[in-house]
Image (cartoon, rainbow, N blue to C red):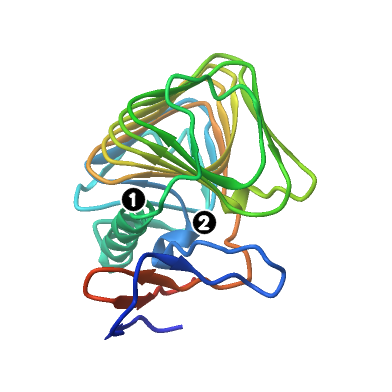
């Protein structure tokens, strides 16, 4: 599907048009095929396995492959990687326009949540288990850092899908040793997956590095249903590219 931009007069607010199934889906455009995308570089130590595309842009350094393995294409500052970074940045911007439904500032992520848009004014941390209960979108708007502790995990139940889980991180994200993570992280700066952390989703760093260490990063495709994001102000209607 092509990208279209047109002005729609009188549009107020940001509107998520839901699918027939009732669950909206957020498009990453051409970034949707990337399991790992860095800006300055991607580094790896140990037997990491990436299932999905690997890329860097505008940087050119991807190191540690091998011993790391990529089951997908590798793109180094080429047309694909630059387009993916631009689309990831657009999604980051779009997510920032969403109005939170729940304020979790100061709370640990280790709790049970149903679909919604969750705000952290500053940092967010996960110790123990974050349970996502039910089909729909889970969007976490984090003002600064995201940190998960060693052995922490995200559990998906009752139709929750990693493809519908997004973490918009205002600075850097660090995933703890032997932790399990589900969802797409779009971070303003660096993403670090420490030793043995497993990720079901994507690691997309807009202005920094992605650092890996003996991880499994498995891409989860976007849901088949589409979304339209209607932006207020000038009434800009965006229909994002789907992979």
Q: Earlier in the sequence, mark 1 or mark 2?
A: 2
Separation of marks 1 and 2 at Cα, in angstroms: 30 Å
Dot 1 falls on a residue whose secondary structure is helix
Number of callouts: 2
In-front residue for pair 224/107 = 107
Q: Residue at x 51, y 56 (%)?
A: 72
Which label lies toward us, 1 or 2? Answer: 1
Residue 167 locus on image (x, y percent): 45, 41
Q: Residue at x 39, y 65 (%)?
A: 14
Q: Which residue is mark 1?
A: 96
Tag 2: Cα neighbours inside 10 Å, few (<14), some, or many (≥20)?
some
Circle 1 packing at 10 Å, graded few (<14), some (14-19), many (20+), is some
Q: Position of residue 120 (x, y in %)?
A: 40, 31
Residue displayed at 71% across by 53% down: 135
Q: Position of residue 129 (x, y in %)?
A: 66, 23
Residue visible at 32% across and 30% down?
172
103 relative to 43 in the view: left or right: right
Tag 1–tag 2 contact (CB < 8 Å) = no
Q: Which mark is residue 64?
A: none
- Kindly state the secondary structure of the residue where label 2 is placed: loop
Determine whether 19 is above or below 184 in the image.
Answer: below
Q: Position of residue 3 (x, y in %)?
A: 36, 80
Work out whether 1 lies above or below 231. below
Task: Check disc 2 and report the residue beneath it.
Answer: 72
Front residue of 188 and 32: 188
């Amino acid at each position: 599907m092509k990208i279209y931009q047109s002005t729609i007069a009188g549009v107020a607010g940001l509107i998520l048009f839901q699918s027939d199934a009732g669950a909206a889906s957020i498009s990453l455009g051409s970034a949707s095929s990337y399991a790992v995308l860095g800006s300055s570089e991607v580094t790896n130590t140990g037997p990491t396995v990436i299932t999905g595309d690997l890329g860097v842009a505008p940087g050119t350094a991807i190191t540690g492959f091998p011993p790391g393995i990529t089951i997908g294409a590798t793109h180094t500052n080429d047309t694909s990687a630059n387009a993916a970074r631009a689309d990831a940045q657009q999604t980051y911007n779009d997510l920032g326009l969403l109005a939170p439904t729940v304020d979790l500032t100061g709370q640990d992520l280790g709790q049970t949540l149903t679909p919604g848009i969750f705000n952290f004014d500053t940092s967010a941390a996960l110790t123990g288990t974050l349970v996502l209960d039910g089909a729909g979108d889970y969007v976490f708007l984090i003002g600064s850092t995201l940190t998960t502790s060693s052995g922490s995990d995200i559990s998906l139940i009752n139709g929750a899908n990693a493809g519908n889980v997004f973490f918009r991180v205002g600075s850097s994200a660090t995933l703890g040793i032997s932790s399990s993570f589900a969802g797409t992280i779009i971070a303003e700066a660096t993403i670090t997956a420490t030793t043995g952390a497993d990720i079901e989703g994507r690691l997309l760093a807009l202005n920094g590095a992605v650092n890996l260490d003996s991880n499994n990063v498995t891409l989860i495709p976007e849901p088949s249903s589409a979304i339209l994001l209607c932006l207020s102000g000038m009434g800009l209607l965006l229909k994002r590219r789907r992979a």
